[in-house]
Amino acid sequence: MTNLPSSVDAEVDVLVIGGGINGAGIARDAAGRGLRVLLCEKNDLASHTSSASTKLIHGGLRYLEYFEFGLVRKALQEREVLMRSAPHIISPLRFIMPHAMGQRPAWMIRMGLFLYDHLAKRELLPGAESLRLQEHVAGKPLRADLLRGFAYSDGWVNDSRLVVLNAMDAREKGASVLTRTTCIAAQRFDDHWMLQLQQADGRQLTVKSRSLVNATGPWAVNVLHNIMHQKAARTLRLIKGSHIVVKRLFHHPFAYIFQHHDGRIVFAIPYEDNFTLIGTTDLDYTGSLDEVAITGDEIAYLCELAGQYFTQVILPADVVWSYSGVRPLVEETHAGDKEKAAALTRDYRLELDTMQAPFLNVFGGKITTYRKLAEEALSLLAPVLGHDSPAWTAQACLPGGDIVGSIPSNRSVREFPQFIQQCQHQYGWLPPTLVERFAHAYGTRIHVLLGQRQSLADMGEMLAPGLYAAEVDYLVQHEWARTVEDILWRRSRLGLHLLGENTNRLAAWLVHARKTP
């Protein structure tokens, strides 16, 4: 084990390793309870699994088939809690499920949808219904032989921005957030940890922490073995999920959920106005966690499955962009008794070790239940640290989510369209479509971004189509953005609209910004 120097650069109560959704959520909850918190992430926030989701806040309809009633109920409860806390980046979405011969019987689907509607209190979203597809706008892009279907509701989320907003709230409540900072060594004592962190420029920091949280997602077992030199109490099965993006396949606001004969589910979702997002796959993964990419077979699978439902033929050549992520699912079967990836639980497991200084490991989880995971993590950890502050995040807005006040409410969701209109009126000197994008990305923080600016000239240089220096400066100052990829693919999805465009001007601006004190 590496010997750490005795001098200390920082002392905290909780050090969180991992800047994905679970790590950011735990850091936020802990900071809000008055604990001294440091979060370190070896890359950018949400640079892996947490920005590679299907972008859904949902109960997980298909998990009912595996009798995961507790998980589905918890996720359904969280669905509306999260909508109220961040109505700018989370919004209702209506799904259409076409029903074809050979699939689960219609009565079984109706029963599942009834359960889905009633497992948890529902205030914002309409219930499920049966449809005659030939009489519904969502039936027009589908094959003519698909006559009936079902509709139900869930939520859509800008996943990478959800992570950033949690990290922002953590920092505003006193936490330190260090991106591009790797934990390279750790020593555990009876009442504290000594940890060595290394930043991208090679500078090293020594941190003394009263507790440690391993929230590294797919890397959780690797961190345990290589940094803490401990064995994992849980077995993680790494499952790769890949998505493709094609040009818009339909001109209505509904999404689709398609059933495949192999038991898997694939979604087709309206995405970034001009595109359709299709995914996901579920494949065991054994490769590098730092270089995850879709395969040709996965592209063909998604194209073929979507082609079984849409009248429009979808070919691999139609794919304009793709992404893949690895989900760390908790393996609870005996060795040699492998379940299908689709059947593995998406629930999480928290393991708190108090034999010496507290050590909390986070295994598994899904983006919808991150807030509940963080709350449960602090209910375990805070008492050990002598803190008895109550849970608080269920009644708190995320940054920018205070559309009608600081307390989350149904009004903030229902009145978000009016908020957009108000912003378009207030900032009438900007193109309405740009103001709408700002409102969705930043919520009430649009007023921090635009400040006292009064004309398009005040936005500074246009560094890429639709991207002005004022926005980039905001992202660098407030949201830890450092690279072109941070800005175009995680803080926004502008990269999808700028495919083939030259981004050298943006890259040069960022280099200059880093050099400027």
Image (cartoon, rainbow, N blue to C red):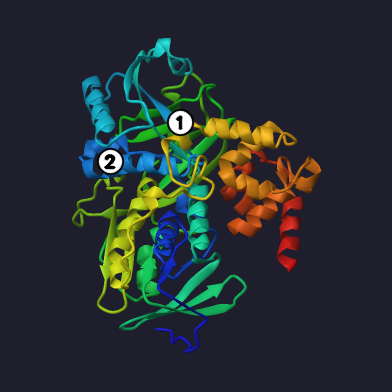
Mark 1 near mark 2, Cβ–Cβ under 8 Å?
Answer: no
Q: Which is in the foreground here, disc 1 or disc 2?
A: 2
Place of residue 348 in the rendered image (x, y in percent of width and height, measured from the top left): 30, 54
Name the residue: 62% across, 45% down: 446
SS of the residue under disc 2: helix
Asked whether residue 481 appears in the rendered view, the answer is no
| Residue positioned 33% across, 62% down in the render | 378
Which image quadrant for residue 275?
Answer: top right
Residue 486 left/right relative to 469: left
Q: Amino acid at mark 1?
A: Ala
Q: Is residue 449 left or right of residue 391?
A: right
Residue 321 appears left or right of 78: right
Q: Nearer the viewer, residue 64 or 7?
A: 7
Q: How many marks?
A: 2
**Crowding at mark 1 (Cα within 10 Å: few <14, some 14-19, many 20+):** many
* Residue 268, label in figure: 1
Q: Quadrant of residue 380?
A: bottom left
Q: Position of residue 353 (x, y in %)?
A: 27, 71
| Quadrant in which the N terminus appears | bottom left
Whole-percent x and y of residue 239?
37, 50
Vertical placement of residue 476 versus 86, above or below: below
Indicate the position of residue 214 as horizontal and vertical percent values. Answer: 38, 66
**Where is mark 2, residue-wise?**
72
**Looking at the image, residue 71 lies above or below residue 249:** below
Q: Give the spatial CA distance, label 1 vs label 2.
A: 21 Å
* Badge 1 element: strand
Q: Earlier in the sequence, mark 1 or mark 2?
A: 2
